[in-house]
Image (cartoon, grey):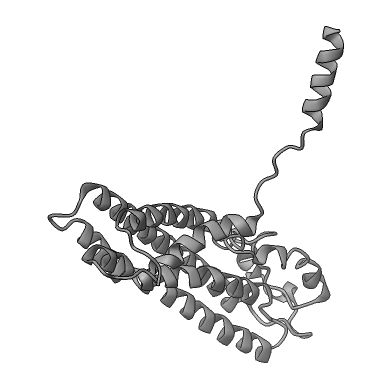
Amino acid sequence: MLASFATASLAGARGQPSPTPAPKADRNAAIIDPLTEIGRVRARTPYCAALAGARLGVDAAITYQYAVPTLYRDLRYFRLDSYLTKHQSEQRTEHDLSSLWNLATAGRAEVQALRSAALAPGVDEAKRTEMLGFANALDGAKARQMELARTIARTYAILAEAPVRLIANAPSDDHGAAALRGGPRAASIGLPGGAPTAQPYTSAQMEGLEDHSREQGLFGTFGAESFIRDDLQEAARHATAAMKLGSCTEL
């Protein structure tokens, strides 16, 4: 009897479905949604107004993450099969890289203003803690975004210096080209499949882009984005707590 009961209990335990992790989109939404609420609070008090003042930094940090895959595409599709296509690749990458840098730097003054407001005399200690936690985490994420933009720029510089490969200009003719192929600086960016190669745009390169669509998810294009994600997750946690403490409601 006991054996039958134990067998039935074990079978029931095995039959229970194991909890599945939340989809990546849901995990990202849990970060993005609380942050976007900061820009929509009703600034009825100086405390809520200070939180709402960080909106530019929040919006720029989120927009940055959606813009990162564009740079991934620029680097992966960088053309070296003619002087015209290389020039077009350079123009496109430089434009997108400049936009990414502007997003990384935008709003940092407003985030620092939030930190100053938290340190002002007379602020409730619980509110001060959440304000500082929010400001520090958001500023940390933007600092990491600036560093990622610099790393992408270094990888672009390697491609920009690579020679154009024509029929009369084979790789074997350039004995110094090996220094441009897969150097440690290029590999440090964390591109899936390794650093981009300074070779003509061929069907073989297209085959290497099979996982391109998968890598275009938020926080998943470059390896360094995992740290940015952690900072923004921490910022979202403090932002939610700060809004609750100040009864800052949405519009």
User: Is 32 situated above or below 158?
Assistant: above
User: Is 94 situated above or below 112?
Assistant: below
Residue 39 screen position, x and y as percent: 39, 71
User: Is 17 situated above or below 136?
Assistant: above
Q: Residue at x 38, y 60 (%)?
A: 138
Query: Is residue 74 left or right of 56 when viewed as pictured?
Result: right
Residue 24 screen position, x and y as percent: 64, 56
> Taking the image as drawn, is residue 217 in sight?
yes
> Taking the image as drawn, is residue 184 in sight?
no
User: Is 43 situated above or below 134?
Assistant: below
Instruction: Write down the quadrant of residue 145 in the picture.
Output: bottom left
Quarter holding the N terminus is: top right
Residue 76 screen position, x and y as percent: 67, 72
Residue sticking out furthest to the front: 1
Instruction: Write down the quadrant of residue 23 in the picture.
Output: bottom right
Query: Is residue 21 left or right of 7 when viewed as pictured?
Result: left
Q: Nearer the viewer, residue 188 or 163?
A: 188
Q: Nearer the viewer, residue 65 or 45?
A: 45
Quarter holding the C terminus is: bottom left
Q: Residue at x 43, y 66 (%)?
A: 37
Query: Is residue 82 left or right of 153 when viewed as pictured?
Result: right
Total label count? 0
Query: Is residue 160 left or right of 168 when viewed as pictured?
Result: left
Q: Residue at x 68, y 81 (%)?
A: 79
